[in-house]
Amino acid sequence: MSELLEQAVTAELIDSLRAVVGDKGILVDAGDMAPFLAEERGLFVGKALAVVKPASTAEVAEVVRLCADAGVPLVPQGGNTGLVGGNVPFEHGREIVLNTSRLNRIRAVDPVNFTMTVEAGVVLETIQHAASEAGCLFPLALGAQGSCQIGGNISSNAGGVNVLKYGNTRELVLGLEVVLPDGTIWNGMKALGKDNTGYALKHLFIGGEGTLGIITAAVLKLFPKPVEQQTALCALDDIAAVTKVLSRARALSGDAVTAFELIGRFGMEIAVKHLDGVSDPFEAPHPWYVLVEFSSSRPDSDLRGAFETFLEAAFEEGLIADAVVAESLDQGKMFWRLREGLPEAQKHEGASIKHDVAVPISRVPEFLDRATAAVEAALPGIRPCPFGHVGDGNIHYNLTQPEGMDKAEYLALWEDMNRIVHDIIVDMEGSISAEHGVGRLKVDEIVHYKQPVEIDLMRRIKQALDPKGLMNPGKVVRL
Amino acid sequence: MSELLEQAVTAELIDSLRAVVGDKGILVDAGDMAPFLAEERGLFVGKALAVVKPASTAEVAEVVRLCADAGVPLVPQGGNTGLVGGNVPFEHGREIVLNTSRLNRIRAVDPVNFTMTVEAGVVLETIQHAASEAGCLFPLALGAQGSCQIGGNISSNAGGVNVLKYGNTRELVLGLEVVLPDGTIWNGMKALGKDNTGYALKHLFIGGEGTLGIITAAVLKLFPKPVEQQTALCALDDIAAVTKVLSRARALSGDAVTAFELIGRFGMEIAVKHLDGVSDPFEAPHPWYVLVEFSSSRPDSDLRGAFETFLEAAFEEGLIADAVVAESLDQGKMFWRLREGLPEAQKHEGASIKHDVAVPISRVPEFLDRATAAVEAALPGIRPCPFGHVGDGNIHYNLTQPEGMDKAEYLALWEDMNRIVHDIIVDMEGSISAEHGVGRLKVDEIVHYKQPVEIDLMRRIKQALDPKGLMNPGKVVRL
């Protein structure tokens, strides 16, 4: 198409879109669009023909149909908090961003059925609060919960801190409403615990990162709200024991372990040094720590008793060296601040090269040993700061730069370090993207590491559902 | 193809298959094949060119490749206990049955990682025992567990009695190994709690009923083994209260409810009349009963105390009329015999027309009212015997014939009754096949009830993964 013709077609499309979503539903000014075009860490900064904000499923369907007819690709976007560039447009500027912020109604809360029906643009924290007000728990919880939207959480199959007990977002979704790439609406809003009437379509859209369709609403699972919670920090002298500690905790608590988070000695040191109100509760230093939390909705559950039984057993078996059970809500919060403040503490120590990886839980110690030996061999002085959801086998294997090294020089090693760590992960049958997804960042990396048959299956599915390739193209899998 | 040519091609294929699986891996004699060709209730009796029993994944792959090259369709089969005819060949006799019985190795049990790696042909009960011996629980449990195979359980996303707490089979599978329709092996045997590196391929094969590929092995999730269990039978005078009873039980037990099974008065009466050792533990008759079970892996969990707290609360709110907590293991077993013996007790009362349906849990009472009014209006004297997994919203809505009616005359009403019940189910946004699947039995029924877009999506996926249509054709969705 000539440039002039293209401009005319675009102008006509913009007019048609404006007629669907109204003036406040469309942004075309570069300044207005800017916040929707950049990934939050500035890793990717794209351009777009427009940012469209439909306010209903019908509007989404009409926007998708118009773009499909015009052959213009769409980038679905929620709270724009994704970490792999799946949520922002490319630099070429010929895409339209479909932002779901105005799809922000909670359609129903049903505490007896333990379900909530929400539109894609509802902010995660709003859902958590609505569940809580109804005496229930929606367990998905993660750093970005104040701004990320449930549609994005579902599209990226978000993980977070409660996966061990409640599963990933995938396990929390009963039903979905999806606008397909041609603008057809699929109403899969079933609030059912069991439904074996054909292929599990919802599971393609969950974690599909908007490449197969746009999620507009969902039926979510709720749970009884915990009324008792106990938190402890355990010190381990040998990381090899960590899986057994988890296994004992699960059994002796009646499977009430809601968090099991790893912190290394370096993490403890920088947290104490840089984070307000964080101190090391142990007299002696230990190489590893695990933050363990038990929760129960049972009013007479005596979780404290269960904790003591568990800690005694773990001591007797020589699995843990020391432990501090939080004596107050404040001390529990301090343990969490220690864990959750690690990315912040790292910033004070210079640049970081990050990995979001998973291995089978029982192989976490082996992974940590191998990865640390390999990166230290590649760059003496590098300071590994592994932390995260060890209860899911998911480690944020972050590498802080050597002291005194130039930041840019260190960050230039990003891909080399990725290769070292991911090679070990793949050799150990792990995942190179445990919870953040593929997006744009890892689209070549998964081709490098996955079996060709798996990429082929993904392409066939993409081709079958989005034959024109207009739904978030270039993300997850290329046609 | 002429008949003679077809016979020659078939003979050549059989020879090639025999070369792959050996003499004991192939049956061609009609008498030898008979047990593999009929659905267990005799609903479908098919024919086949051969029954092939490969003993390894490599053999499965080679068999699939040979059949694909010859254009001969395959019917994957496990323990042949399915209830919708998905597991048996058609009457035309031009298919080959691929039976997984010889893929019967448990490859690994990892109690620390809470995983087990098994081949498709391992019998469910064997898996339960192996988990138990390792101090763990594999929670899938259902009537056919002594003969059904895990590959079939996964392919049909089996439900059973523990879904409320542990989920359907889908939730119990971490990784899969699948032979695709062209004979390629997909190794998706990840033992990971988190893996967001692309589309959730495994969820297409889980519940795919062998129409997209053949599952040859799986990594299963294990759980801490319960060490305490309490069972009670609750009597309800008003079915409307059942959802609140469940909600209180979940909250006050710390979400330790492992079974919540409905039994109606008619069910109680015929169970007491026909089943050895079953008696009504209540002095007065009640219209509804619920079997409630709490389980915990915690040694000091005081589940009895939790049960008493729950029952007192339910009494005070007027939700239950009476309750008996099992005072012994034997009494607990009697409660289960009452529940599980219902299909058997029904047989003594004549013919049954059956439905395996689900609605949102909170709408179960409404469904029971509407369905019973409708079938009684259609056939006065009909005796509804609803029972099942009310904790999942899944009711086996079985209809016993009127007393004295001719069996065949009653069974001729099967489709009429299905239409009445399924119309109500679909109107209530339920599922017409909660746990048994689609197979051959419901392949037209789902076309009748599903949105066309959903059938279209299913066809596109089938076409994308099995373009020649040779993998269990005519089941789940027709091309």
Image (cartoon, coloured by chain):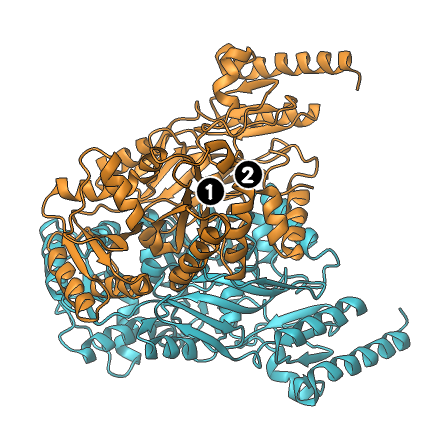
Chain colours: A cyan, B orange
- Closest to the observer, A21 or B146: B146
- According to the picture, the residue beneath numbered tag 1 turns out to be B436
Q: Position of residue A341 (x, y in %)?
A: 33, 75
Q: Is residue A128 left or right of residue A87?
A: left
Give amino acid for label 2: Gly
**Is residue A87 shown above or below B107?**
below
**Is residue B70 shown above or below A105?**
above
Please report the residue visible at 67 percent of the width from the left and 52 percent of the height from the top: B456
Label 1 lies in what chain? B
Give amino acid for label 1: His
Question: Helix, strand or loop at disc 1?
Answer: loop
Please report the residue visible at 26 percent of the width from the left and 40 percent of the height from the top: B271
Q: Residues within 10 Å of mark 2 (few under 14, many from 20)?
A: many
- According to the picture, the residue beneath numbered tag 2 turns out to be B439
Q: Position of residue B178 (x, y in %)?
A: 52, 37
Q: Quadrant of residue B65?
A: top right
Label 2 lies in what chain? B
Q: Is residue A324 left or right of residue A335?
A: left
User: Same subunit under labels 1 and 2?
Assistant: yes
The C terminus of chain B, quarter of image: top right
- Closest to the observer, A411 or A344: A344
Q: Position of residue A457 (x, y in %)?
A: 62, 45
